[in-house]
Image (spheres, coloured by chain):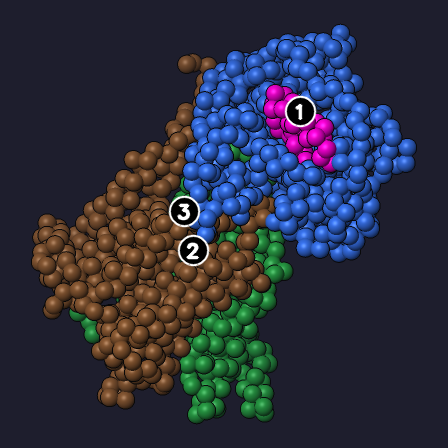
Chain colours: A green, B brown, C blue
Amino acid sequence: MIEILQILLSESFWSASLRIATPLIFGVLGALLCEKSGVLNLGIEGIFVVGAMVGWMAVWLGAGLWGGVLAAALAGALFGLLHGILTVPLGLSQHVSGLAITLFASSLSYFSYRTALPTVSSPPRIDPFQPLDIPILTNLPFLGPVLFQQTALTFLSLFCVLLVWYVLNKTALGVAIKAVGDNPNSVDAQGLSVYGLRISAVMAGSALMALGGAFLTMSAFDAFFFGMVNGRGWICIALVIFASWRPGKALLGAILFGAFDALQVRLQTEVGAFVPSQVFLAAPYLLSIFALVIAARRAEYPRALLTPWFKGQR
Amino acid sequence: MIRIEARDTQSLAWNLGLPVISATLALLLAAIPLTLAGAPIGESYFYMFMGVFGSKFAFSEMLTRATPLIFTGLAAALAFRAKLWNIGAEGQLYLGAMAAAAIGTGVFDVSGIILIPTIIVFGCAAGAIGMIVPAALKIRFDADEVVTTLLLNFIIVIFLQYMLEGPLKDPMGLGWPQSSPIMDQGMLPKVMERMRIHYGIFIALLCAAVAQFMLIRSVWGFKLRAVGENMHAARHAGLPINSSLLTVAAISGALAGLAGVSEVAGLKGYLTADLSPGFGYTGIVVAMLAGLSPAGVVIAALFIASVFVGADSMSRAMGVSSYLADLVVSAALLCVLLGGFLTKYKIISVASQSGSSR
Amino acid sequence: MNYKKVLSLKNLSKSFGRIVANQDVSLDLYQGEILALLGENGAGKTTLMNMLFGHYIPDSGHIEVADETGHFSELTLGNPQGAIAAGIGMVHQHFTLAENLDAVDNITLGAEPLRSLRRNRSKAEKKIQYLIDNSGLSAPLNIPVGRLTVGERQRVEILKALYRNVRILVLDEPTAVLTPQEADTLFENIAAMAADSLSVIFISHKLREVLAFSHRISVLRLGKNVGEIDTSEADEQKIASLMVGTKTSHPERMVTSVGSPVLRLENLSIAGRGRRDSLKNINLTVFSGEILGVAGVSGNGQAPLAGLISGMLRPEAGQIILDNQEVKQINPAEMIAKRVGRIPEDRHRDGIVGSMSVAENLIIEGLNEKKFQNYGMLKRENISKHAEALLTDYDVRGPGSAAPAQLLSGGNIQKLILARVFHEKPLLILANQPTRGLDMGAAADVAHRLIEARDRGAGIILISEDLDEILRLADRILVMHDGAFVETETRDRAELGLLMAGQAA
């Protein structure tokens, strides 16, 4: 018990939590933006893979780290556009289209990676993002050391939380996105484009998802591995419901999740002799299901989620 | 400016022709990645074709590959008909496989006539439980089954690793994480000498036939279709929603479990963690390509298996990544989605400036 | 009134597939005028207005609008933005409000450029307050619209249009969801705005309000112009005959002998999520051989009442006694077994499974009958014979018993449901808005079937928002308000209206 408390109070623990949470923060925000506009994006898992691969590949080809980030976001937006076209004007099943995007995006990433690097035995490495030293922030008590070890992408994810919150709550665009996710007719009757709003939201959300993937190859690790996304996208879909579609709660949910994951790694070293390691490996997925089960009943889904809207059919 | 209008009638020819066109289109689109990979197109397609139809062995390999896809395709098709989104066939396949490995490796040393059905029953039961749990969570807690089945896939694979390192581990396996071999009398018989194809294909075809018949002709199938097509009207008409969902969940999971049984006790003879190269997920593509019809699943599974086997043999010959097969399969799904849209709707282009002329 | 023309619809035609919604329709509107667009359900009124507002693109014809200076120009078709810019506002019958947003957000939606990084909410609120003060249309501004009453939502809808500085306002069936008193207040507000030079078109099929509040009446029938008349020269007889064409006969209400109770609800309560889904300790008896009419503005407890009788909802307290036996298990299957026939309000959602065949839809409530199944297998021959017989008896027209039910027209879908329900000779029938959205022929058919069933001895609960329908068919009338009943002897519209508004007559 004391050990757990010690872990929970240590700065390195929270630093690790925030690091683990970063891809989830991007992913949950992305899923949130899509769903707020009324589109479920199950392409998230594949878009993570695309972001991881494209970001890494761009850096490896010499685009520079921020060039890689930009490339990943653009690639994500492109798959978002595909999902948007299939589900918004064409009104196809969001479930099936999303799964198709995931299958297509991941196989395309793997194929491209293998085609570009046919013969390498161990994955080539890049110089990833390094921890940032921001003078004022790192002098803060407790928070300073936690933030001190983070890379620029983690700061970007925190900034995106603020950005998404601001857009949704303080701008006309945000009002329109929330409206189109609740009742598309309200937007159409005021002369705004339902298709335009939804496709843009899905593209922006998908770009955020891809950044979550890019973090994996450009900050958490320095290379691209097969299967490295490992269900993080699906976890984000569960976390959005847990966060009841609020950016602030999404951040909280992701960090709690990261903390739990960091804790299980540390507990593993303490009690690993008695408990099979698989229990710890499975814990994040079990936790997601648990979070979903407790949150689902009282979740207030965006009312128009999953419902296609066709112009002129009212 | 374009507009979308529902077609008054959906032509039957279109409904049947669509999957064929989509599949062909996806295959043709493979020329793009092939060119990028620097492979000569004609030769590549030739090797792909020969990889399936070039020899009796090649063809039997394709049938062997199609067997688990028929099972997982049926699992997805039946569940999707009831709008129960079972994306967990991959995990349920492994549950079935684990049950087969647990039962078939020496717990009961009985003759094959008893052992094989026992393995099948336990494999089905294990798979069924794997889908009943998320269905129950959906009914009881509104927990979205898409997310729960997807996450369960990961949990089950981790559980599999534990089982292969512990209880199911082969003591003679030189430390490899694999199960003991299934006893000889527990193995499904081979169809042909010196080929890998086994009786699993017949079980799969039987399941497809029964599923097709039950879906259209039985009260159970009637209820399942009604619940899937319009849950509100089904509830209003007094149909038992929850029990319909639970039975279809059980059957869907059992079919996925059978895929695992057939791979372990038909093909491999033992269980490893890489038993399935994503048969569960590919089953979704099979089901969609089949238009969620059990009979169609058989044809779609044969096609997808051909793509995999053909592309495998082509990629070995041409040195192209074998991920090409996955790419073609997922592109086929996208094509069939788009095509399905075109059979239901027509896109009309209209002039946005409808002026005084005309 | 001055006679400055502000809007001209010229020879508009529109078809949907094989259905002609509008054919060569023309219409003029003058400044400060209140024009009533009158016609039956399905006459093409809403389609016409949706073309004006850019939701639909006409197959042919065009629209001209005057700007502030009176200069006419052609309106870009199929573009709501263009209509808004030309000063046209529309209040739809089905509200187009985002329920998760408050009134201010709903009103300003689309009025500010999406690119702007900041919003000036307080400025918007000031303008809205100014509009409220001038028009008398008040509504809470800062709580989510989902929590407002229907009347308040409608006022928000109108404010939405006014905020965009409309000069032409189109109201589609504005009083469908209001009590007669609320409707009167609304029209007083509209008259004041018209006097202030707003031009108004309102769509209605209620002769009374059309005669009371419009300046001019234009009548549509089967998608065509059939007449235009100044309200001062109109009377009910004149416009009714224009509207209907040949006169259809309404079934005569005959006094029949009332039998024993078939349904008793005792001290029933349902606490739903809001006022709309609650029943407060109600008592009700329905006798065999009577049609009990339940009048009221929708959202006053009709939904939970219907849900209860159709078995979809369980009460928190109280008893349901059917045919002198308490119903312990309340679910749809049990209600069907106890011979309750249910005609659902939303026939597309709850009444049919659209992609399944007509024959299958006809047996969906009788799946367990030996006639239709044997050891879990469907008897397909019997099922299709059964369907053929019912289609003939109930005059359901369409592409046949094997075709998907969704290919039937709205009226024929309702006939399919009638066939399913009535051929079982139910003891009790719940008819929830049975004629809503039907043309007069199909509606008359529904009425005849209800009377036929009543005469054979069934007890019938008729829930309807259409007061005329209740007055025509019901042997006894109950008014629902705020989750409770008021029984009344009166057949006076005004008195019933007061009861609907919750004021004792």
Residue A268 at x, y percent in the picture: 46, 86
Dot 3 amino acid type: Arg
Q: Which residue is mark 2?
A: B79
Q: Which residue is mark 3?
A: B217
Q: Nearer the viewer, residue C130 or A193?
A: A193
Q: Chain of mark 2?
A: B
Q: Amino acid at mark 1?
A: His
Q: Could you say whether the residue bearing mark 1 is in a helix, strand or loop?
A: helix
Depth check: give the residue in front, C387 or C242: C387
Residue A60 screen position, x and y as percent: 27, 66
- Residue drawn at (61%, 61%) of the image: A297
Chain letter behind tag 3: B
Which callout, 3 or 2, points to the residue nearer the camera?
3
Instruction: For the C terminus of chain A, give its image quadrant.
Output: top right
What label does residue A19 carry, if any?
Answer: none
- The residue drawn where x is 80% and y is 24% is C255
The residue sitting at 30% across, 48% down in the picture is B296
Q: Amino acid at mark 2?
A: Ala
Q: How far is the residue under mark 3 from the one under mark 2? A: 17 Å
Q: Which residue: 23% across, 52% down?
A: B303
Are the residues under badges 3 and 2 in a single subunit?
A: yes
Quarter holding the N terminus of chain A? bottom right
Residue B57 locus on image (x, y percent): 11, 62
Contact flag, marks 2 and 1 (Cβ < 8 Å): no
Horizontal side of residue B113 vs B6, given as left or right? left
The chain ID associated with circle 1 is C
Disc 1 target residue? C448
